[in-house]
Image: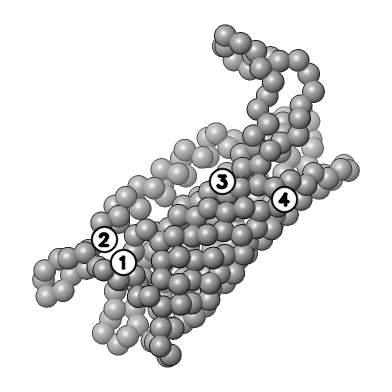
Amino acid sequence: MTKLIGPTLAAALLLPSLAFANTVAVDGGEAHRSAETPWGGSQRVEGRLGMLVGGSDVGDADGFAMGVSAGIGYRVGDVTLRGLLDYYRIGDGGDEAQDRRGRSTRLGGALRYSFARASDDNGSGSGAAVDFWGEVGLGYEHAAWRQGGVLDRPSGELAVGFEIDAQGKERSPGRRRHIGYFMAFRTLIGEGPEMDGPPVCGGPCTKATKPSRLDTSMFFELGVHWGR
């Protein structure tokens, strides 16, 4: 499942970001590259709520997964420091003979950088903005199986996405209210439990090996954000 979802969603998010990588602003009919972010060099606090859809991977248990996400961040210019909370399903796919099911809770932090942006000021000090960003982070995951047993482990995160803001008027220097929605593709990477058994060939190969202990969970995330 994760192998099918990953390339499709990555392409869907990366293609529009490439199109906006050289965003221009139009002033008096002459186009030029904007030297400012949609929020200038201002600071802001933001909250997020989202839904996760994709595939979870814990050892040899991988399958379709859904969950929820939440975050709070503090942004200065193009850089945002965020705290994260994710809660999602883990376990086997519905077409597998085994029926291992559980839930995973992940707490973490991430550093986000806005690499492309465009804004539209309507002349009253408010307007809309589109922001494309990349993110790296670290977290700690607690997986609990319904039949019994837990797995605790650190994990890394890679993400790309974009968001749209509706921005209010600036009510204090460098601050304005904002609300909008976002879409992202997130990959969580952790070390899986060691698997028993001799080395094998899962397909055509020149040398048998044990299964990789690198677990990769991939999620499409969409939701809303707000703050000031």
> Residue 118 — which label?
1
> Marks 3 and 4, Cα distance to the nearest angstrom?
14 Å
Quick one: which residue is furthest to the top in this view?
206
> Residue 23 — which label?
2
| Mark sitting earlier along the chain (1/3) | 1
> Marks 2 and 4, Cα distance to the nearest angstrom?
38 Å
| Mark sitting earlier along the chain (3/4) | 4
> Residue 187 — which label?
3
> Residue 186 — which label?
none
| Mark sitting earlier along the chain (3/2) | 2
Q: Are marks 3 and 2 in contact (CB under 8 Å)?
A: no
Q: Amino acid at mark 3?
A: Thr
| Mark sitting earlier along the chain (4/1) | 1
Q: Amino acid at mark 4?
A: Glu
In front: 101, or 26?
26
Mark yes or no: residue 49 visible. no
- Classify 10 Å Cα crowding around label 2: few (below 14), some (14-19), many (20 and above): some
**Mark 1 residue element:** strand
> Residue 141 — which label?
4
Q: Are marks 2 and 1 in contact (CB under 8 Å)?
A: yes
- Classify 10 Å Cα crowding around label 1: few (below 14), some (14-19), many (20 and above): many
> Marks 3 and 2, Cα distance to the nearest angstrom?
27 Å
- Classify 10 Å Cα crowding around label 4: few (below 14), some (14-19), many (20 and above): many
